[in-house]
Image: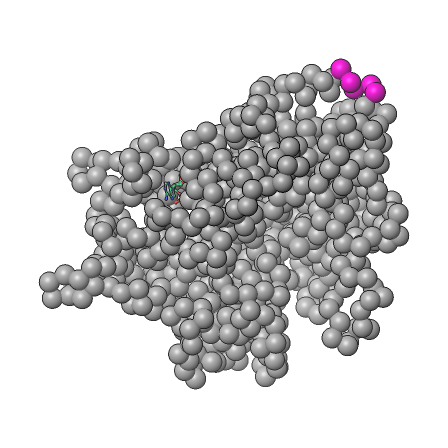
Amino acid sequence: MRRPPTRLFHSSIRRNAAQETSQLAKPPLIQIKDGTFYRHHPNSLPPAGHDAPPNPALFPNLTFTLPSFSSPTQHWSILSASSSARTTFLQALRGQHLCFPPTARSYPYLSTPEIGTKDSRLRFPAHAIQYVGFDAERSGLGGTSIRGAYLASRYESRHEVDDWTVMQYLKGETELNAPEQEELLHRPRGELLERVIGDLRLEKLVDMPVGNLSNGQTRRARIAKALLGAPEVLLLDGPFMGLDPPTLRHLSSLLHQLAEAQAPRLILSLKPDDVIPDWTTHLMFLDANYNTVAQGPRAEVFEQISDMYHDVIFKSRNAFRQLQQKSELNPLWLSIREIGRHLKDRGYLPEPDMNSRKYRHASNISTASDSDPEQLSKDGFSIFDTGNAPILGNPVVEMSGVQIRYGDKCVLGDWHTPSHSPGLHWTVRHGQRWGIFGPNGSGKTTLLSLLTSDHPQSYSIPMKLFGRSRLPQRGKPGLTLWDISARLGHSSPEVHTFFPRHLTLRRALESAWADTPLSPPKLTHEADLKVDAVLRWDFEDQDIHVGMGLEWAEETRFGEVPFSAQRVLLFLRAIIRNPELLILDEAFSGMDESARDRCLLFLSYGERKTYRFLDPNASAERVGMSAMPAAGEAKVVDSDISRLDRVRVEGLKSDQAILVVSHNPAEVPGCVREWICLPEAGMGEARFGRLEGPLGVGGVEGEKRWKGIWGV
Ligand SMILES: Nc1ncnc2c1ncn2[C@@H]1O[C@H](COP(=O)(O)OP(=O)(O)OP(=O)(O)O)[C@@H](O)[C@H]1O
């Protein structure tokens, strides 16, 4: 059901209807005709092999039109398994990257007199087309927040001089020197400001420093800020990443209203497992090599993807043999498999005509099914646990009535159960694998900051870590920051934000053995071997030839590799020492899906297991598996390194405790069984539960488990 538009958009919708006829004749807003893009001028670089940075042709011969007005309205989403392809495409739309020929990319509507009368700055694509990316969101609001400050400052009452309030951020009052007259003219006016604040539910947050906002709150503030610039087009890169289901629904409906009003026009970029909003009318599908694979009306693109997907899945043996040869892995095929599987699982794809000749081999190929008892999660866990629950060790975390308050606002533990003192009562034991869930703003990050000691109140609350309090007690010294960091592995968007970009990849990993990323690591021979093993696994895939050089890891800096690869490295840094307590807080968000799946597998099995693409025509006995995989799926098998008995990095040990925060079941490791779901402030108490198997198995069972956690 369509919701009525909010106040903000009423007037524009009315105006649009009245002006429809004349608007239809207006020139397109973005027009690309047979254009190819490059990051650097192809003639400006030394020839390949002479230290030239990679400079692939981006979206060769792209033709794309975004109308300025259309009836019915066109709402585009860009789909790709590669975050880099998605972001690069959006950048190209707003005038970034070199276009060949230069005239192939134009913005005819921005040159019309109509735009001139609105705001002369809108003539420039970089102004008229605003980009909001969410990968590094928890780093703050466009550099206006915790700039260079230590993470802990988020939780302290005194803030830096430039820790602006949300209102200052929205109004653009974030310069220490007074702005020029021209700038003042363009500040958002009262009425618009009030409406945007209301529509994005920011009323209660306007006086809060931007550094204190949670992930979901930050997202709303960033969209509000972009809207206040009144752009013609808003590009939202991964808008649903890291949002809880209710916030996601609210945001999607809000975006729909904006898009319908064409004020601004919206283009979303989506990951394969993102919800594709019902109101998306047009899709662009990109592969990981910066090629456009399909574009057009939604149903047509789904049909094309369905054809390609079933082709890849059911194709002849020869094609699958090619897939098996890792060196010949075809990024287009991989992209089609990844996108196709997700779209098929969610019922977007039409079924192919199985009578057609090309599917004649398909009859003996299995497809994934919930009833298959042998079905595994992507990281190799059976869909239902069969063995006994693990024997648990001593407590690692003991909270006995924890409440966190700022003035009279309680952001964690604002409840009272008859059997306990008020607040959160929670024990995590050695060997337990916990998922921490809850809506945006429910206090998950705050809870973890108490364990990592980023929160100053961690000294005063009733909490023990590793059996000790933070402050000294009779006969027992207090637990120092160094004690904690030696026993803890932690990866989160905040760790990412503050991680030194200049460290080499090897040094970044080695910092797992240091007190802080910049202090000298205390390495042993065993640690060196582990670092080598992880580097080989990370960048060269599991079945590398042992003994290959790793010089690249000493030559490449952390800041030089793509965002997704940085996340992978920080994940590996967190797990490499098998810490007693491992915290993975949105650690997999922002990773490309294939990298994420490999990381999840590595978490549980280290170098022991790997993925293999299997020939769907082979029999189960021949490939040494108890059941055949779903058609075209990569399956978890023993690695060559394991067979050669050269494993240096084992997976999780039975006595490690892990805590995982995620809003996406596919990002929750298959080993997680215990869960806690924090309530929204003032909405009751935390709920606890235990799963009968992994969360990320999709299908009916996966959905049932996920909904159970959210109390749906
Ligand atoms: N110093 C502070 N003063 C007041 N409120 C604060 C402060 N720091 C955080 N908050 C509030 O505490 C609440 C919990 O924030 P937290 O980041 O822990 O939530 P979260 O569950 O991790 O959210 P998300 O899923 O969006 O990341 C939020 O409403 C946030 O605005």
Quarter of the image for residue 537 reads bottom right
Q: Residue at x 85, y 66 (%)?
A: 43
Image quadrant in which you'd find residue 544: bottom right
Q: How many marks?
A: 0
20 in magenta: yes
Q: Is residue 617 left or right of residue 435?
A: right
| Stretch in magenta | 18-22
Query: Which quadrant holds the C terminus?
Result: top left
Q: Is residue 640 above or below residue 139?
A: below
In what quadrant of the picture does the N terminus appear?
A: top right
Please name the residue shown 38% across and 54% down the image: 152
Which residue is more in the foreground, 371 or 668?
A: 668
Query: What residue lies at 61% left-to-right and 46% top-to-bottom?
Result: 133
Q: Is residue 355 placed above or below 551 in the rendered structure?
A: above
Q: Does residue 519 show up?
A: yes
Query: Ligand 1 is located in which of the four quadrants?
Result: top left
* Residue 121 located left or right of residue 653: right
Kindly identify the residue that appears in the image at 67 percent across and 41 percent down: 130
Q: Is residue 560 left or right of residue 63?
A: left
Residue 50: say if magenta.
Answer: no
Q: Tell me if residue 669 can be seen.
A: no
In the rendered image, residue 533, in percent from the top left (x then y), is placed at 52, 76
Residue 684 in the image: state x and y as whole percent.
31, 33
Indicate the position of residue 699 as horizontal and vertical percent values: 53, 43
Reply above or below: 12 against 603: above
Residue 466 in picture, x, y percent from top left: 25, 62
Q: Nearer the viewer, residue 317 or 245?
A: 245
Q: Residue furthest left?
A: 474
Which one is in front, 113 or 107? 113
Q: Which SS does the magenta portion mostly show?
A: helix
